[in-house]
Image (cartoon, helix red, strand yellow):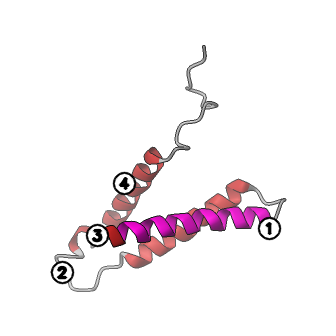
């Protein structure tokens, strides 16, 4: 599992680095556009990597054997990653308490 964690961390770090590089290379770039493009690419890669093998009885593929199952798992992972992010809550959130 250690190797999987390091690959995960490296992929996440490279994604952040790519976003920063794209923003640095084009000072006029909208950061939201950069971020949305990174998410779109990550989703495409994730969906590609989760394609079932074609054997309807494959136990490894069965949890993600339909498009609906893959979407549900992707949504779960996105929610988890967002909630674990240090940027999830912002002092400028409209529901942030003010003293």
Q: Considering only order in the chain, which callout, 4 or 1, is on the residue closer to the N terminus?
A: 1
Mark 1 neighbour class, 10 Å CA radius: few under 14, some 14 to 19, many 20 or more: few
Residue 25 numbered tag: 1
Q: Considering only order in the chain, which callout, 3 or 1, is on the residue closer to the N terminus?
A: 1
In the image, residue 33 lies at what x, y percent? Answer: 70, 59
Q: Considering only order in the chain, which callout, 4 or 2, is on the residue closer to the N terminus?
A: 2
In the image, residue 86 lies at what x, y percent? Answer: 52, 44
Q: Report whether residue 41 is seen.
A: yes
Q: Circle 3 sits on which residue?
A: 64
Q: Report whether residue 67 is seen.
A: no
Mark 3 neighbour class, 10 Å CA radius: few under 14, some 14 to 19, many 20 or more: some
Residue 38 magenta: no
**Residue closest to the eye, 77 or 2:** 2
Q: Circle 2 sits on which residue?
A: 58
Disc 3 to disc 2: CB gap under 8 Å: no
C-alpha distance separating marks 4 and 3: 13 Å
C-alpha distance separating marks 1 and 3: 38 Å
C-alpha distance separating marks 1 and 2: 45 Å
Dot 1 lies on which element? helix
Q: Circle 4 sits on which residue?
A: 76
- The magenta segment is 4-25
**Residue closest to the eye, 26 or 55:** 26
Q: Among all residues in the image, which is located at the extreme right?
A: 28
Left or right of 20 in this view: 8: left
Instruction: Label the magenta part by its dominant secondary structure.
Output: helix
- On screen, 69 above or below 83? below
C-alpha distance separating marks 1 and 4: 33 Å
Left or right of 39 in this view: 75: left
C-alpha distance separating marks 3 and 2: 11 Å
**What residue is shown at x 56% (from left), y 20% (from top)?**
97
Camera-side mark, 1 or 4? 1
Mark 4 neighbour class, 10 Å CA radius: few under 14, some 14 to 19, many 20 or more: few
């Amino acid at each position: 599992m250690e190797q999987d964690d390091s690959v995960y961390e490296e992929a996440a770090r490279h994604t952040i680095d790519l976003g920063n590089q794209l923003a640095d290379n084009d000072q006029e770039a909208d950061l939201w556009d950069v971020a949305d493009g990174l998410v779109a690419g990550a989703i495409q890669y994730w969906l590609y990597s989760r394609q079932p093998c074609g054997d309807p009885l494959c136990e490894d593929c069965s949890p993600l054997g339909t498009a609906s199952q893959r979407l549900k798992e992707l949504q779960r992972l996105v929610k988890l990653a967002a909630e674990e992010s240090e940027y999830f809550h912002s002092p400028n959130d409209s529901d942030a308490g003010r003293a």
